[in-house]
Every structure is written in C-alpha cells, then in structure tokens.
C-alpha cells in the first residue's frame, strides 16, 4: 500500500479497522468529551465545579460515561467512514499520473541522490503536503455530514440542558420541535472545524512521522525490518520499521499533530456546541461567533480547549497508531497470501 508496495487490503478491512479503533477511543475517552460539552455550554461553567457536580450524583461513574452509546455510534462509524474514504482517496492520488504530472501532488518519492537508505514508520502512501491536507479534509467533511444527526443527538444527550431519557426519545423530540433540519444544527461550524482539523492533522502527522523517523534512524540505525543481505526491491523507497520502532513514533506524532490542529480549530468547536445546544438563540455560525465574543469575550471561543486538546491528542494518537499497525500487519498477510496463491 505504501512506499511503493503493491499489497493493499480491501476497503472492507479499512472500514473495520476504523470502526474498531474509533469505538475503543470513544469508550475510553467519553468522560473528557462529556466534560468538554458541559464546559462549553455556558460561559459560567468551569472544569472543576462541573466535575464535582457530576461526581456528586448517586452514580458518578455512570454519569461520567453518559452519552457513551451515541459517542460510540458517532465515533465508531465516523472513524470507519473516515479511514475507508481516506484510504480510497490516498490510493487514488498515489496512483494518479495526471495529478503527479500537474505538480500538485508528489505521488512518488523523488529519486535519491544518496546511497543512504531511509526508513519510515508509516504504513500509508507517501503524498505531498498539499495532498495530505486535501485528502484529510475531504474525507472528514464527508464522514461528518453522514454522521451529523447522531452528532447532534450525542451533544444534547451529554448536556444537562435537555432531559432526554433515551436516544430514541432525543431523536423524536428534535424531529417534533425542530423538524429534520434540527439534526443538522451547527453543520457549518462542524464542517469548518472538522475539515481543516483533519487536513491539518494528516499534514502535521505525516511531517512529524518523517522527522521522528529520521531522528530515530540516526540514533538507532538497526531499528528497521530490512537487513543488509535482504535489501528492499526498490533501494530508493523507504523501508517500513518494525512495530516496536514505528508504534511509539506514530503515537507521539499523533499527539503532536492533534494538539496543533486542535488549538487552531477550537473556536469552531465552541461555536458548534452552542449552535447544537441552543440553535434558537444563536441562529447561525456568524451570529453565534459574534454574540459569544461580544457578550463573553474572545476567551469564550477557547472554552474547553484543554479538555478537547487532551482528548483529541489521545484519541487521534490511539486510533491512528492502532490503525497503522493493523494496516501494516494486514499488508504483510495479504502479500503472503498472494505469494502462496502464486
């Protein structure tokens, strides 16, 4: 799949890999997501008082994981759609001679002028910065639109502004009071948040992996899969590292990339939360942002930044590290299976 290799698991594998990694991260990090929603819903909400209020309930653990089911549905299916569509886009770009000829993308690595071999922690196609940014944004915006109804239900279910007792009750209430458009409240802010976030994340993630792989190779030149007696088929192509070497690099890269992308896009997340919780009061994205700044100051656009940054850093790093490892293992077995058939 990557780095010049022809092996590529079917699209169904990428869907299932995204589903499993997204579900795991959603369950583990639901308390942080719930706290972020509660902090962002009001200018008078603060983290510690909000946490104390939740823990004072008769069932504090259950309260912290309130809304887990819609989160699992949204994040699990959303990750499945995202990773499978991202894989399809990246494969198309990597194989497109037309896009490579225009200079907009670099589907293949330039010929090496050095005899030194390079090593990579990545199991994904090597694309240009522009291609990483664009494919990430398109894949996330598409998945976000498909999952928007469950996203609205999730946010309202986590909030204490609504007394929904079940997901079905929440969906019925939204449909009855707001009509079908209620399920797409805040989509503009969501798209403007998610598309740039995903694009920037993939861009930063790939750049961090490349830099950290180079540093790791310099420090530990033997930490790779190849041996001097068995060089790769293409000496100019980077060699994929072992899981023991690549997983830490991918995880750290995921944390750094998520932190940077989250800080840049947090204002749209704060606006999105207000629109989904109180669409009647804030109207649209522009009015909402203006009113928040006018009444509460610029700081309101960064409410929940610490929680979101911590959650996104852990969830993205966990999901992408597991996903790349699953892809790496699947590619090996897929290639072995093809060789066995031949």
Image: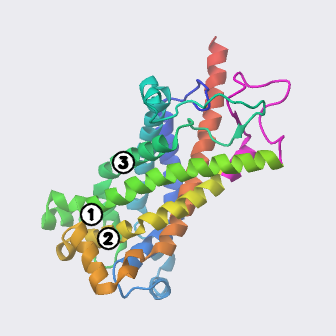
Dot 3: element: helix
What residue is shown with label 3?
Answer: 143
Local SS, label 2: helix
Which image quadrant for residue 174? bottom left
Magenta residues, start to end: 220-249
**Image spot of residue 315 (x, y percent):** 54, 59
Instruction: Measure the alpha-carbon separation of dots 3 and 2.
Output: 20 Å
Q: Which mark is residue 271?
A: 2
Location of residue 196 by image quarter: bottom left
Is residue 103 depicted above or below 287 in this figure?
Answer: above
Who comes first in sequence, dot 3 or dot 1? 3
Q: Nearer the viewer, mark 3 or mark 2?
A: 2
Sequence-wise, the earlier of marks 1 and 2 is 1
Quarter of the image where the C terminus is located: top right
* Observer-nearest of 135 and 35: 135
User: What is the CA distance from the residue labelled 1 to the residue labelled 2?
Assistant: 8 Å
Q: Which residue is mark 1?
A: 186
247 in relation to 7, above or below: below
């Amino acid at each position: 799949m990557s780095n010049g290799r022809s092996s590529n698991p079917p699209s169904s594998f990428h869907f299932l890999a995204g589903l499993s990694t997204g579900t795991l991260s959603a369950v583990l990090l639901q308390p942080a997501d719930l706290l972020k929603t509660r902090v962002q819903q009001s200018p008078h909400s603060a983290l510690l008082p909000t946490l104390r209020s939740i823990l004072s309930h008769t069932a504090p653990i259950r309260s912290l994981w309130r809304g887990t089911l819609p989160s699992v549905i949204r994040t699990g299916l959303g990750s499945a759609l995202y990773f499978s569509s991202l894989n399809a886009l990246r494969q198309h770009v990597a194989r497109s001679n037309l896009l490579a000829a225009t200079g907009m993308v670099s589907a293949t690595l330039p010929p090496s002028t050095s005899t030194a071999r390079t090593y990579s922690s990545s199991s994904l196609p090597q694309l240009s910065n522009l291609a990483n940014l664009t494919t990430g944004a398109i894949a996330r915006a598409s998945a976000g639109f498909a999952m928007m109804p469950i996203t609205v239900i999730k946010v309202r279910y986590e909030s204490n502004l609504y007394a929904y007792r079940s997901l079905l009750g929440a969906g019925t209430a939204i449909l009855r009071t707001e009509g079908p458009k209620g399920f797409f409240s805040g989509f503009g802010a969501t798209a403007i948040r998610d598309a740039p976030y995903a694009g920037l994340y993939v861009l930063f993630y790939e750049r961090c992996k490349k830099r950290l792989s180079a540093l790791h190779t310099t420090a530990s030149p033997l930490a790779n899969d190849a041996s001097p007696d068995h060089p790769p088929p293409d000496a100019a192509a980077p060699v994929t590292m072992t899981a023991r070497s690549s997983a830490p690099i991918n995880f750290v890269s995921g944390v750094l990339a998520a932190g940077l992308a989250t800080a840049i896009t947090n204002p749209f997340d704060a606006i999105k939360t207000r629109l989904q919780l109180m669409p009647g009061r804030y109207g649209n994205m522009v009015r909402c942002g203006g009113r928040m700044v006018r009444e509460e100051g610029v700081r309101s656009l960064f409410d929940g930044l610490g929680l979101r940054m911590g959650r996104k850093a852990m969830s993205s790093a966990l999901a992408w590290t597991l996903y790349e490892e699953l892809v790496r293992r699947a590619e090996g077995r897929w290639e072995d299976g093809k060789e066995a058939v031949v």
